[in-house]
């Protein structure tokens, strides 16, 4: 499995995708720069992605900064022992408090191996991660794409990707998650690069980025 660790990997994926699906040549021409979009792998990045679920980038950044200040170091053992007051001070909702405790416990007490999960193929990796309480497909997919550099993950439930593919291929209304997942099947084993391509297309289409909140623009631009 070739990880998406450098721009050379992105470029190789784009070339392979455009050869396999000539429609993507026009998409690539419109998209322009297709950034690497990577964050540091590990437990802290997973926590950041959990924090960013269903909130704006500004809110996610503020909450995670407070949490990182209160929980030092950001390890499963330290987070598992955090008090309710600490979580409230960080600004975390009760469902996210429950999720973070469960995930920290899975790492600290049950020996959950995140690196091993990320070495599996896309479906197996997502299934392994979503077995943790509070980790849904979006959280698993975002981690696998941006922290692990998994080459073959395509978050078909992402509204920006649905909009971008719908616009590029003149599909109106935009494809559903199920329909988009079916379209993306032809982009194996480079679905992770296809997702980056269509996020870049969306940026040009809408004049704004659609990065998940946990992915910082300055890191994504590497």
Image (cartoon, grey):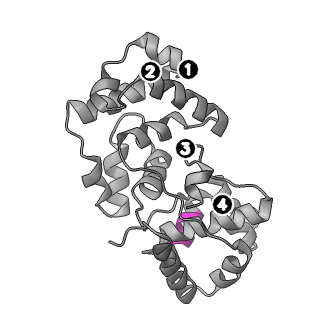
Residue 196: % across, % down: 57, 65
Which of the two discs, 1 and 2, sits closer to the camera? 2
Q: How far separated are the C-alphas under marks 2 and 3?
A: 19 Å
Residue 117: % across, % down: 29, 53
Q: Which residue is mark 1?
A: 91
Looking at the image, is mark 3 or mark 4 earlier in the sequence? 4
Q: How far separated are the C-alphas under marks 3 and 1?
A: 16 Å
What secondary structure is found at the residue carrying circle 3? loop
Q: Is the Cβ of the residue at disc 1 closer than 8 Å to that at disc 2?
A: no
Residue drawn at point x = 42 percent, y = 34 percent: 134
Looking at the image, is mark 1 or mark 4 earlier in the sequence? 1
Question: Along the horizontal axis of the image, is 136 left or right of 166?
Answer: left
Looking at the image, is mark 2 or mark 4 earlier in the sequence? 2
What secondary structure is found at the residue carrying circle 1? loop
Q: Which residue is mark 3?
A: 214
Residue 141: % across, % down: 46, 53
């Amino acid at each position: 499995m070739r990880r998406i660790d450098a721009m050379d990997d992105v470029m190789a994926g784009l070339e392979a995708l455009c050869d396999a699906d000539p429609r993507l040549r026009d998409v690539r021409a419109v998209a322009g720069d297709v950034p690497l979009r990577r964050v540091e792998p590990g437990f802290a990045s997973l926590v950041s992605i959990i924090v960013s679920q269903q909130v704006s980038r500004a809110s996610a950044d503020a909450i995670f900064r407070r949490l990182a200040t209160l929980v030092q170091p950001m390890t499963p053992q330290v987070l598992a022992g955090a008090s309710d007051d600490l979580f409230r001070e960080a600004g975390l909702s009760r469902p996210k408090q429950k999720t973070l405790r469960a995930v920290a416990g899975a790492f600290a007490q049950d020996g959950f191996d995140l690196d091993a999960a990320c070495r599996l193929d896309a479906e197996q990796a997502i299934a392994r991660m979503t077995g943790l309480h509070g980790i849904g497909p979006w959280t698993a997919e975002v981690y696998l794409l941006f922290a692990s550099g998994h080459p073959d993950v395509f978050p078909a439930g992402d509204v920006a990707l649905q909009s971008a593919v719908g616009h590029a291929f003149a599909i109106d209304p935009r494809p559903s998650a199920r329909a988009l997942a079916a379209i993306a099947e032809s982009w194996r084993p480079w679905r992770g690069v296809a997702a980056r391509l269509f996020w870049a297309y969306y940026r040009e289409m809408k004049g704004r980025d659609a990065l998940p909140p946990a992915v910082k623009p300055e890191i994504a631009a590497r």
